[in-house]
Each structure stands twice: as C-alpha cells, then as structure tokens.
Amino acid sequence: MSHPVSLDAPDLTGLGRDALGLLNDSELVIADLDGSLAVGLVPVAGAADLAARLGHRLVIASNNSTHTSTQLSRVLVGCGLEIPSGRIFLAGETAVREVARRYRNARVMLLGSVALAEVATAAGLVLSDAKPDVVILARDLELSFARLQRAVDALAGGCTLVVSNPDLTHPGPGGLPQIETGSLLALVSAAVPKVFPIIIGKPERLLFDAALAYAGADPSAAVMVGDNLSTDIESARRLGLNTVWLRGRRHGNSPDATRSAN
Ligand SMILES: [Mg+2]
C-alpha cells in the first residue's frame, strides 16, 4: 500500500487511514454526490482537494435526475470541484439514454426537466404525451396533476414505466425533506399497482456498470464512496466493489471502509 494521503479539510478529515488506503489503492473511485462530495450542489470542504488528488480516477455516480452531466460539471467546476462531464454518471440522463438504447425511436412521455427532454430528443426519442410506448419518470419540478393523470392513463393501457431513481426524498435546506422521484413513483404505483417499474439509478447496477466501463476497471479494483448505506454501499458490495461509507459524519462517526472479498 502506498502512503495514505492526509486531508486537512474539515469535512473529509474523518476519512481515516483505512479509507484513505482504499482510495489510494483503487484504480477507480466512484463517489456519490449529494451528502458525500457536495450538499445542495455546493462541494463540502475538502472535496475539491480530494478531486484534485484523485484526478481522472474519480468519477461521480449520482441519482440526480434533474440536471445533465454537462450542467452539473459546470456548476461543480465553478465551485472548484474539477470533474468533467464525461466522469459524471447521472440517473436521469442514464434513464433517457437507456430507453433510447432499449426502445429505438420509441414514443416517450417524459416527466422530467427541459434539460432531460433535450437529451431525449438528441438520443432519437420522440417525445409525446399521446399514446406513448414508454413513460419516463424523473424529478419533474413542473409536474402537473393533469400530466400525472395522463401518465397513469398510459400505464393503465399497458405502456412501459422507466424510473430514474427510487429515492423518496433528499435533504434540502435545514435538512427538510425534498420530494424525490421515488415519492412520485409511490403515487403512480398506488394508482396502477400492477405496473412493474424499471429502475435505473442506484441501488440498481447501471450507474456502477457505466462507471466501471468508463475506467475499464474490475469491481475489485474500484471503491464506492457514499453516505447512503442502502443505495451506495450495500449495492456496491453486492457487485464486488470496495466501499467507504461516510456514516453520520456530522455526528462525528468515523467512515467505515470495507474491502470486497474478491
Ligand atoms: Mg448521497
């Protein structure tokens, strides 16, 4: 093992020797964004330092379904976190691209941001609320009751449901819960319980696979860094990745670094 890096920034100083050893040893470091590298798109203290130290070995895998990787990279770089868009893997963007790959030229009803709609059109999808083949559910901040009902109508009629991410909430200002895509899915599922959603984001494997493929890395040579035990850590361990769980850092707990059995 090479010498552990020492981080002096307050929010990441708790990483400790085991965690730093894992980061140093890994070909690829896959980091969650919200609650890990940043809070509300503002990098936590020490994140920029870590990104600079890890360089191209650091990628982001986030369940964000509002922004594109280009938008997010611009924001993060503006705050000193130098991560280019090619190293950012997002649930919303991945959902749209996956639908374009699985259902070529499909008619898609997209419940999502304008930015995601542009990604969909560029990927060859035909956006239409009339007789869609697929409904893509993402974190749509402009969502109306009428469009939600149209989506339910389409799903009741047999159309496929693809969901960017299953998170019910994410923490907002003052820690208040912000409605996430999973809460919208709960509403839709209550109305059409027989519809089986295809989930794209963590804890499913697509974002992990995309990050590993980008780096050409084996899971055992990669480490997942995140704050959510279920979506970041347990899912990564199932795939054979090493993990650094940033558990309860605000309460002074030290991170839990676990090497895979491989
Ligand atoms: Mg998180």
Image: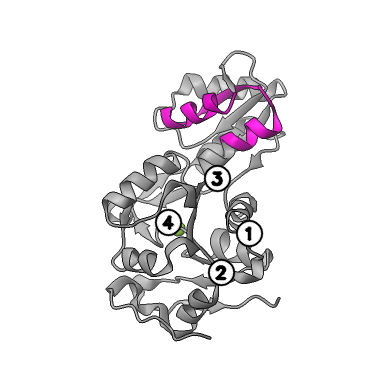
Q: Residue at image x 66%, y 38%?
A: 197
Circle 2 residue = 27
Question: CA–CA distance between discs 3 and 1?
Answer: 25 Å
Callout 1 touching callout 4 (CB < 8 Å): no
Residue type pointed to by label 2:
Glu
Residue type pointed to by label 3:
Asn
Callout 2 touching callout 3 (CB < 8 Å): no
Label 1: few (<14), some (14–19) or many (≥20) C-alpha neighbours in 10 Å? few
Which quadrant holds residue 80?
A: bottom left
- Compare marks 2 and 1 and give the one earlier in the sequence: 2
Residue 213: percent from left, percent from top = 63, 54
Q: For disc 4, does the CB lie below 8 Å from ligand 1? A: yes
Circle 4 residue = 33
Residue 72: percent from left, percent from top = 38, 45
Mark 3 or mark 4: which is in front? 4
Circle 1 residue = 216
Residue 28 vertical position relative to residue 197 in the rendered view, above or below: below
- Compare marks 3 and 4 and give the one earlier in the sequence: 4
Instruction: In the displayed orientation, state which residue is furthest to the top.
Output: 130
Q: Residue at image x 62%, y 68%?
A: 241
Callout 4 touching callout 2 (CB < 8 Å): no
- Label 4 element class: loop
- Compare marks 1 and 4 and give the one earlier in the sequence: 4
Circle 3 residue = 165
Mark 2 or mark 3: which is in front? 2
The answer to whether 22 appears left or right of 4 in the picture is right
